[in-house]
Amino acid sequence: MSAFIYGFLLLIVNGYLVFGIKDGLYDTEVDDVLPLNNESFQAMVVKGKPDIVWVVEFYNSWCGHCIHFAPTWKEVATYFKDWQDLVVIAAIDCTQPANLETCRQHDVSSYPTLKIFPPASVQGGKIQTLHSNDKESIKKWILDFMVKNAPISWPHLQPLEKIEDIWLDKKETHQHVLLIFEEEDSPVGTEVIIDVRKIRSVLVRRMPKRSVVKYGISKFPSLYTVRPDSTYNMLSVGTKMFADDRVAFVQTIKALANSHPGDSKNIISSNKSREQNLGKEPHDEMLPAARRYNSSVVSMQDLESALHYSLRQEVALKKHIDGDTFLALQTFLDTLVKYFPGRKPILGFLVKTRDMLRSLGKNNITGEEWMNKIDSLQDRDNYLPAVIKWEFCHGSSPLYRGYPCSMWVLFHTLTVSAYNQNTGTRHGNPQEVLLAIRSYMKHFFGCQECSKNFVSMAQSVEGEVHNYKDSVIWLWSAHNKANKRLHGDLSEDPEHPKIEFPSEKMCLQCRIKTSTDAETQVSWHMEKVLEFLVSFYSEKNIVPSQNLVSDEVSANSLEKREVDWWESKLQEQDLKQIRWLREKKQKQIQEMNQRIYNKKDSNYSARLEENHVFSLWGLTHLDFSLCLIFYLLSTVIILSMYHHFIVRRRMVTCRNIMS
C-alpha cells in the first residue's frame, strides 16, 4: 500500500516537473529543486524508496537570506540532477501553514537549514544538519555523506586499500576493471563511479594517494585498467581541474565500454597528449585569449581608458564632492600628476585639472560642476580622449574585465613609477601612492563590496610599507589575494581565469620549488618578483595603441559603445544622472547658439509675436488666407441670396399694390 502511495505521489511530482509549478522560491519548470509539502515529505522522504538520499532545504519564502541562497541551492540541484535515482535535492517552505508540523518536527529554528536524510535501508544512518551558503562545501558534504551511507544496491563508493581487493567485486558482466588513483580530498573518483554506474560491462573503484605510493603511482588523479595478472596500464591522467578530469575520465570509460577487445591500446594512445601536457598551466592550450593577455606588455590604451572612466564616470557620479571625498580626489590627482607615465596631452590635462581644484577657493564641488570644468579645460594641447576601448583588458564579452582590470594595471603602474623615481633617495613618502589609491577606492569606486575588501586589506599599509620596494610588493600581494578570492566567481571571465600573477610562463625565476619525498612546495622569490614587476609596469614597457595615433575625439563614441558589466553594476539613478548632465550641457550649447542667431536677426521679435498669434489657433499663413477667402466668398453668396429672395419679393409686392 505504501509503495502504491509513493508511486502515486511520484507520478504527481513528475507531472509537476513536466508542466511546471512555482512553489515559494522554486519553479519546477526551470529549476531542478523538488518542492515538497507536508504530505509529499511524509510519503517520499520518510516512507519512500529505501535506497534514496534526500537533501532538503527548510526555508522561509520571505527571508532575505533564503532568497539570496536560492540560486546556490538551484545550482546544487543541477549538479546532482543526473543522480536522482540515488539522491534528490528538495525544499519545503516553512511559511506555509500546512508545512508547519514538518518544520517543527525537525526542529528548524533558523533559515535556511539544510538536512540530509540517509536511505532507510542503511542501518544506523542519522539525519545530519548543515548551516552553509558555500556551494562547494555543500556538494562535498553531500558526496561524503553518500560515500558513508551507501546502500548495498549502490556501486561501491568507499576507497580500496589494496589493489587486489578489486577482484572481490568483479562479476561476469564486467569486461573492464578500472581504478582511479586520486588525492585524499578529490571528488573525481566518487563522481566518476556514480556517473558510469549504469554501464554493466565496467567495474570502477578508487584508491587514495596514501595507499598507492608503494605501487609507483605518481600522477593524480589518473585512470588505470587492471588485469588479473596484476599488471595495469594508464588510460588517462588528470590536470587537477576536477570538473574537466571528471568529464575526461567518463568519456574514456564510455569509449572503452563501446570498444572491441584490443582497442584499449588505441584509447591509451589517444590520452598520451593529455599526460604530456601535465606540466603546463591548466587550460593554456584552450585559452589563446589568456595567452595574449599574459604577453609581457602594458597597453597605454587601457591606462587612458581607465583615466577616462574614473574621471568622467565615477567622479562625475557624485552629487556632491566635499570633505574627505574632495581630499581623496585632490590626492588622487596629485599622484597621477607625479607618477602617471602618459603622453604629453594627457599629462597636461591632469596638471590643469589638479590646478583647477587647488584654485577653487573652496573644498567642495558638485558632479555637474566637475564635468563642466574638466570639459572646459580641454584644448588642442591638453585633453583626455573621450573613447573607451579595452585592449589587453578586453574580456571575452562586455560583462568581463574592462574597467576593474585597467584600474589594477593603473595602480601597479603608479607604484612602479614611484619606485623608479625615488629609488636611491631619502625623500618622499613610500606610502603616498597606496594611500591615494585607498582613498580613491573608498570614496569613488563603484562596487561597494570591492571597495570594502580593498580598504580592509589596505589598513595594513602604514604598518607594512616602509620603502618604495614595499609599496610595489604590497600591491602585488593584494592583487593576488583578490584573484584568489574571486577565482570561480560569477564575475570571472571564463577565458581569462584569475591566477597567481605572474604565471610561471611569464616569470619562471619568480618561483622557488622545494622538493621533498612527499611533495613539491612552491614559494615566491621576492627579489625576482620585484624585478619582474618593475620591468613589466615600467614606462619603457608600455605599448602605445594604434587607436591613440589620432587625437580626434568622437563626441558620440562613448554613447554608442556597448555598456560593459562594470557600468551595468552602477545604480540606474546614477546612470540617469550622468545622461541628464550630458543632455543639459548639450541643451545649454543649443540655447546659446540660438541666442546668438536671434541677436543677428532684427525682425526676430516681430516675427515671434506674429507666429505666437497664429500658433494660438494652430494656423499657418496659408490656412489663414484660405479662411479669409472662404469668409468673403460666403458673404457674397449670402448677400446674393438675400437680394434674390427678400429684395425681389418686396419689389413684386409693390407692383401688385400699384396695379
Image (cartoon, rainbow, N blue to C red):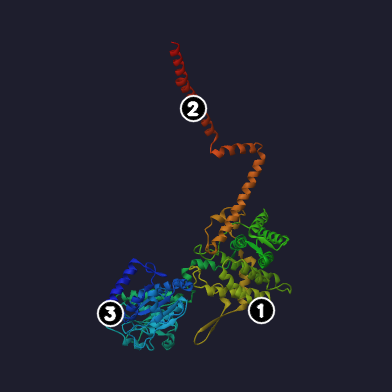
Q: Earlier in the sequence, mark 1 or mark 2?
A: 1
Quick check: marks 3 and 2 in contact, CB under 8 Å? no
Residue 82, horizontal then vertical, whole percent: 36, 74
Q: Are marks 1 and 2 in contact (CB under 8 Å)?
A: no
* Residue with the mark numbered 3: 2
128 or 406, nearer to the observer: 128
Of the pair 609 and 581, the residue shown nearer to us: 609
Across and down, in percent, residue 649 comes to 44, 18
For the residue marked with disc 3, what is the amino acid? Ser
| Location of mark 1 (residue) | 463
The C terminus lies in which quarter of the figure? top left
Q: Can you tell which mark lies on residue 572?
A: none
The percent position of residue 239, horizontal first and vertical second, equals 45, 76
Front-lying residue, 47 or 280: 47
Q: Residue furthest top?
A: 659
SS state under label 1: helix
Check disc 2 and report its element: helix, strand or loop. helix
Residue at 30% of width from left, 74% of height from top? 9
For marks 3 and 2, give the CA distance.
97 Å
Q: Which residue is mark 2?
A: 634
In this rendering, position of residue 637 left or right of residue 413: left
Mark earlier in primary sequence (3, 1): 3
Q: CA distance from mark 1 to mark 2?
A: 98 Å
- Is the residue 480 above or below the residue 609 in the image? below
